[in-house]
Image: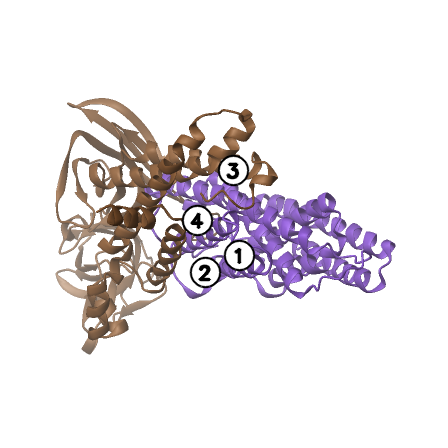
Amino acid sequence: MKKLFALIQGVFLSVKTTIFLLITIALVSIIGTLIPQQKEAAQYIAQYGLLLYRLFDLLGFLDLYASWWFRLLLVMLLINLVTCSIKRLPRITSRGGFTMREWLGRLGPHITHLSLVLILIGSLIGNLWGFKGFVNIPQGDEANAIFLKGTEKMLGLDFTIRCEKFEMSYYPESEVPREYLSDLVILEAGREVLRKRIRVNDPLQYKGITFYQSSYGFLPSRPEERKAEMEIIPKGKNPKAFRIQLGEGETKQVQGTDIKVELATLIPDFFLGEGNRILSRSDQPNNPAVGVNIYQNGKLSYSGWSFLKHPDFHGSKDDTYRVIFLQYSGGEKPYTGLMVVKDPGIPFVYGGFVALVFGLICSFFLRRRSTQKGGEDA
Amino acid sequence: MLNPTLFQFTMFIYLLSTILYCLYLVTKKEGVGKSGTLTAFLGFILNGIALGYRYFETHRVGIAYLPLSNMYESMVFFSWTIVGIYLVFERIYRARGLGAFVLPLGFLTVSIAVLGLNPEVRPLMPALQSDWLFYHVVTCFLGYAAFAISFGVSLLYLFRKEDKTSKSLLPSQKVLEEINYRSIIFGFLLFAVGIITGAIWANYAWGTYWSWDPKETWSLITWIVYAILLHARFTGRWTGRRMAFGSIVGFLSVIFTYWGVNYLLSGLHSYA
């Protein structure tokens, strides 16, 4: 029994073990940088084949840093660091015979090691009692629940968050986005308690939960909300142009004339499919097109296509009118994509950061040169 | 555009300084060595002016950012930190001969930027628009530069035969070991601060201080390599040649963290 204890003590207390663990952690970490992590199974199978995929999955290579054996390595390092420091605790806690500077210099390595322990404990606390999630809020809407990351589950909040406005700006003369901005309001029982305009690098925090600007998008519009504004120019001796706004399937009589305009088709994203079938590629207004029929005295006198982004193109055999597609309004609503995080481990992690830097400064710059070599096996 | 021209001049001055340092080792004339140091110092000043000028240039084109945001800018900043830290070491240890081994690194980094990378001032994506960019990049690159110097010193250590004649212009192996150790602890501390500021920034921008993306993982690997070196030294096991080999391995890891990850792997740091 004593022998076993001595063996365990020998394994956990030795600096050789520390170095072995550090080398192992460094080497296996490389695997996770070579194999893309946390991707879809289909992507792995396409890249590596089924057999290799199953092997990687079995070994935990596809989510390596969360695998049980990687965490075991980290816990072993933690135990090693703690036991190494405890063993030397009696020798270093008393200041006897040392100046403050020397004493701090001797404490330095232990402060450094314990700071790493603090960081690991902080990450554990974050894993156990924190969460990561996301929520998409359309402009003008509210949310009081979020989706948890990596699961289908939702989590209720005990307050409401509203997105009053989502905006993005671009660099001058380019399509590179400069800023994403969301005006957020926190509501408690219907009363406004906090308001902030967030952007990337400037989140909103309330009750330990932080909301980060993460993405954006547009809700697909409903067909009945889509409208097209057109200018119609009759050809002839005295052309009198007129403007008209219509929804799909709508027909309007032009005031004071015998002309009727029908918007037969309104397509947000025009696309010519197989066999010249006219389709819409998506709900987004990427290439809006209108199919217009014009009747004079009840008789069809014009039928053709016009495009918002190609005003010079006229898809009509009839030479009676010219139809210019001026404006498309689809009623698309922007939404803001928020990352929602609660991490009660942060104070420990940041405390660990401060201690780490302090410990390193003590160990490197406050020790006497004679103690730098030999003897001190921390 | 004036800016790339300033960096081209810097490149030529670093080349000149490299040549002078090498001539110094051959001719053993003090004056040649001094002119090598002076040229290196002039190059350092010009490199700094070029960086400052680029900062104003980003304002002129209406993008306005710190010129530490893409590969080109990081390389010209890297050369600046290498030469700057080297000049400090040269002064402290009175080891002028080292210049022949360190200045080539400064010349190499600035020439890779000037000859091979795109110097265009490009708009900064929203995630990079933060004050943390400055603290993160500056500390990381000071760390990298210190590691680069320990690499140069280690190369010299391995090639140098200990001669008993006291007239050698190169520092003794004992001094080289000391410089190697000093630059490693300096790099280790600053690189730690670089990783920490990166973590705090990531938590501010993305809500997570560590996401095991390849750049983060490789910087941790690099840090661990140097941690192993320091522990092996503290226990008295690794000195001399072993330490020099270890520091070369460490610098290969630095190069992979800096370049390999960007060009061979993919991840969040794909922009710089």
Q: Earlier in the sequence, mark 1 or mark 4?
A: 1
Which SS class for mark 4? loop
Please name the amino acid that badge 3 sits on.
Ser
Residue assigned mark 4? B125
Please name the amino acid that badge 2 sits on.
Asn
Q: Is residue A144 left or right of residue B161?
A: left
Location of residue B208 (image quadrant): top left
Asked whether disc 1 touches disc 2, contact meaning CB atoms under 8 Å apart, the reply is yes
Please name the amino acid that badge 4 sits on.
Met
Residue B56 in sight from this viewpoint: yes
Specify whether disc 2 shares its chain with disc 4: yes
Up the image or down, B259 lies above or below A163; here it is below
Residue at position x 68%, y 56% in the image: B173
**A22 or B216: nearer the viewer:** A22
Which SS class for mark 1? helix
Asked whether disc 3 touches disc 1, contact meaning CB atoms under 8 Å apart, the reply is no
Q: Earlier in the sequence, mark 1 or mark 2?
A: 1
Which SS class for mark 2? helix
Residue assigned mark 3? A363
C-alpha separation, residue under disc 2 versus residue under disc 4: 17 Å
Residue assigned mark 2? B262
- Specify the color scheme: by chain
Residue B62 in sight from this viewpoint: no
Q: Is label 1 or label 2 in front?
A: 2
Specify whether disc 1 shares its chain with disc 2: yes
C-alpha separation, residue under disc 3 versus residue under disc 4: 39 Å
Chain to which the residue tagged by mark 4 belongs:
B
- Residue B193: percent from left, percent from top: 48, 41
Residue at position x 56%, y 49% in the image: B184
Residue at position x 43%, y 49% in the image: B125
